[in-house]
Amino acid sequence: MKTNPVSKKISVTVHLTPNDLDEMELKDKNLVVIDVLRASTTIAMALQNGAKEIMPVGSIENAVKISGSLFGGVTLRAGERNSKMIEGFNLGNSPKEFTEDVVKGKSIIFFTTNGTVAIGKGKHAKNLVIAGFVNLSLVVDFLSTLNEDIVILCAAKENTFCVEDAVCAGRIINKMSSLQSIDLLLDDAGIACAMLDKGFGKSILKMLKSSEHGKYLTEIGFVDDLKICAGLDTVPVLPVLTGNVIKLQKEKL
Ligand code: MLT
């Protein structure tokens, strides 16, 4: 039990899937969206490599409509359907594709089956940050400085539980709990995630390889992406939703 008299109780609510979650429930919340495989990782990678902004959209039709009216050359369409590249798009959803020479200075219209849909649910949030293992410590720093109640939303897979997002949520919780100045009040989903991280989080890559989506990505030829997504703090950037685009948080709170 922490005895620090200045520590404030921060309540953490975890949604293990976006299922049945109404946008208005997330209004004015401090929201963390997690899609370890692979949208969170890809977004972090694109922004680290100089993409100007990423516009998450909820459907392929919207991606086509929006990019149609934008200036060619500075706008890219990226994303996936069933984790595979979409016809007519410039990029898929493999973090490997988002290299500096491809994305620097570009606006990216981004659709993914689960990740961008979960982000869309948080469009009325007060703060929305994108988290994966690759930028975990920076997310924890941000949340600790914020020192306010938090909601964590796991993108999951087609509204069913995903172990990798839950373990990542648990790692955020465990890292925050270890800070002397922070006293967390967890819901049951948060307690379960923290325990999952303690049980399965020792080898992130092993955990990703044993996950359903990890196995599927391996089967369709993206095993290298699992290694990238398993990197801890390897892409130290903080993607935040600003208006309707995701950008890097530059200024400290
Ligand atoms: C998603 O948002 O559904 C994913 O990131 C799927 C993937 O491409 O691995």
Image (tube, rainbow, N blue to C red):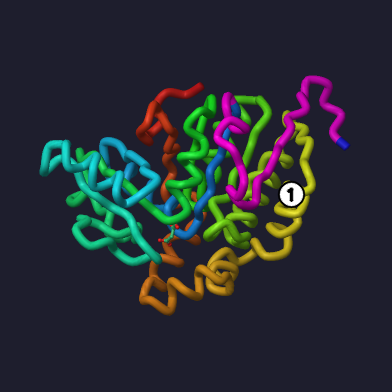
Front residue of this view, candidates 160 and 206: 160
**Cβ of mark 1 under 8 A from ligand 1:** no
- Mark 1 Cα-neighbour bin, 10 Å: few <14, some 14–19, many ≥20: some
Q: Which quadrant is the N terminus positioned in? A: top right
Counting every numbered tag in the picture gives: 1
Q: Residue 15 magenta-drawn?
A: yes
Residue 173 figure quarter? top right
Query: Residue 209's x, y, as percent?
Result: 53, 73
Left/right of residue 140 with respect to residue 216 in the rendered view: right
Q: Which quarter of the frame holds ligand 1?
A: bottom left
| Residue at which label 1 appears | 189
Could you say which quadrant of the image residue 200 lies in? bottom right
Q: Residue furthest left?
A: 72
List the single residue furthest toward the bottom: 219
Is residue 80 something one can see in this rendering?
A: yes
Q: What's the residue at 47%, 41% (across, down)?
A: 119
Q: Identify the residue at horizontal 41%, vertical 48% (top origin).
A: 235
Q: Any magenta on residue 100?
A: no
In the image, residue 23 sits, relative to residue 234, either above or below, namely: above
**Relative height, residue 23 to residue 223 (above, below):** above
Q: Foreground: 142 or 192? A: 192
Tell whether 105 sits left or right of 237: left
Q: Is 249 on the left or on the right of 152, as rendered?
A: left
Q: Residue at 50% across / 55% down in the picture?
A: 36
Expressed as whole percent of the image width and height from the top left, the position of residue 154 reads 58, 50
Give the magenta part as a residue range.
2-28
Q: Position of residue 90 (x, y in %)?
A: 20, 55
Q: Secondary structure at mark 1?
A: helix
What amino acid is at disc 1? Ala
Percent position of residue 72, x then y: 11, 42
Residue at 36% from the left image edge and 76% from the top image edge: 221
